[in-house]
Image (spheres, rainbow, N blue to C red):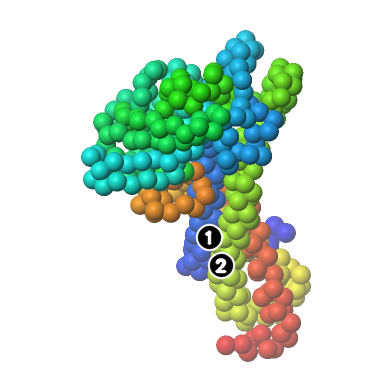
Amino acid sequence: MKFLISLAFKNLTRYKRRTLITAGAIAFGLMMYIFVDSLLLGIEIESVRNLKWFETASARILNDDYWENRFQRPLDINIPNPDKIINKLEDNGITATKRIEFSGDLILNSADFGEDGNMSVVVTAIDPKRDFDVFEFGTTLQKGRFLEKNEDAAIIGSWFAEDIGAELGYWITIVTRGNGGFYEAMDLEIVGIVNCPNPNVNRTLIMMPIDVADEYLAMEGASTEISIKLPESADVEEEVIHIQNLLNGDGLTVMSWKSMAADYLAIAEAKRGGTGMILFLIFLIAAVGISNTMLMAIFERIRELGMMRSLGMSDKKIRIAFMLEAAGIGLIGSIMGVFLGIIVNFFVVKYGINYGDMYRDMDIGYRVQAIIRGAWNFKTMGIAFFAGIFMSTLVAFFPTKRALKMDIPSCLRHQ
């Protein structure tokens, strides 16, 4: 075995150009595999984070009958005394805030917007004092200021503002049905524009103070939901059970962000399968390139192979020698590929890739607005490293086996 290893090493150094070309093919394939995997993992991580930070929070308390009617956003299926529940949660070290979510028609007047118009919208009424303890809107302000209590004011998303041509100081009118079925019109001044990294929110966001909404909608202190923030390290499902026990029923249910985002997670899982196929194809392309290079390398040396056999070297040892040589090429290529992958990944993680123009006009489901950043995945790097060696060794087996089927005179006469 020592002799075979020495022979394989000498062949690697003797055919430097071929060794570098084949190792380069392996390195490029592995680098692309690490890069694509990092990018996809980064998108998934950021999407989940933006989902929790700006849409669902970690968990949510709802009336038992609300979820199945959530698309109608009924105000009469509510939580009657949310402040009492929030105080109980805070006594147990849990951060929470109340919200009212309702649908309505947005009326645009020509005095501000140049022409009259209307569109269906969803409005979220928030507690300006507590909401930013649960959601991460505090760092998203682009223009103006945040909401204050007891003011007929609104904050909107920057993409939504661009779509309707809104500016600070413009007035909008929301026409909706209050708690009880009566119609109500609310005139709100735009006092702030936020640039939210969640594109789904940024396209549609309208927020107003909850005390103003309570008065207009006759909610009498009730809210449609209580949003909860949990530590990142917390087991969300266990915490949901704990909170549910704290509520002692009361006609309320606690839902984790995973339950509320089940549709998104199902889509993400399907996309993960598709991206897995992309990664497989990258590996397959690299394998074909390596196989072709090894095939050429072995068939160029058939005369050498015949000479080794005529000197008494067994087919088994010849096969091992060529596979050791291929493994050496794979080792060199894997080292280069992982090294290049780390370099590329460093820039992708730190600076990311700006796809803002593409995401502005389309919705691909992920909660990423503009800059896509990768994520470090050392498990993938380890898999890529050993896969490069294994793949090189494996693809050398078949052409060697084919060459060894030739008899010695045919090998020696091969041109």
Q: Secondary structure at mark 1?
A: helix
SS category of the residue bearing label 2: helix
Query: In the image shown, does 396 or 17 lie closer to the viewer?
Result: 396
Which residue shows up at 59% across the image and 49% down it? 268
Residue that extends furthest to the front in the rendered view of this protein: 182
Q: Position of residue 308 (x, y in %)?
A: 68, 76
Q: In this rendering, is residue 248 above or below 53?
A: above
Which residue is the extreme one toward the top?
Answer: 91
Q: Which residue is mark 1?
A: 29
Residue 90 picture location, percent across and down? 59, 13
**Residue found 56% across the figure and 24% down from its top:** 223
Residue 162's x, y, as percent? Answer: 31, 44
Quadrant of the rendered image containing residue 299:
bottom right
Q: Is residue 329 left or right of residue 4?
A: left
User: In this rendering, is residue 139 above or below 20?
Assistant: above
Amino acid on which disc 2 is placed: Ile
Taking the spot 48% from the left edge, 18% from the top edge, the residue there is 130
Estimate the x, y position of residue 150 in percent, counting from the top left: 39, 18
Which residue is disc 2 drawn over?
285
Do residues under tags 1 and 2 come within 8 Å of each other at their CB atoms?
A: yes
Q: CA distance from mark 1 to mark 2?
A: 8 Å
Which quarter of the rendered picture does the N terminus lie within?
A: bottom right
Quarter of the image where the C terminus is located: bottom right
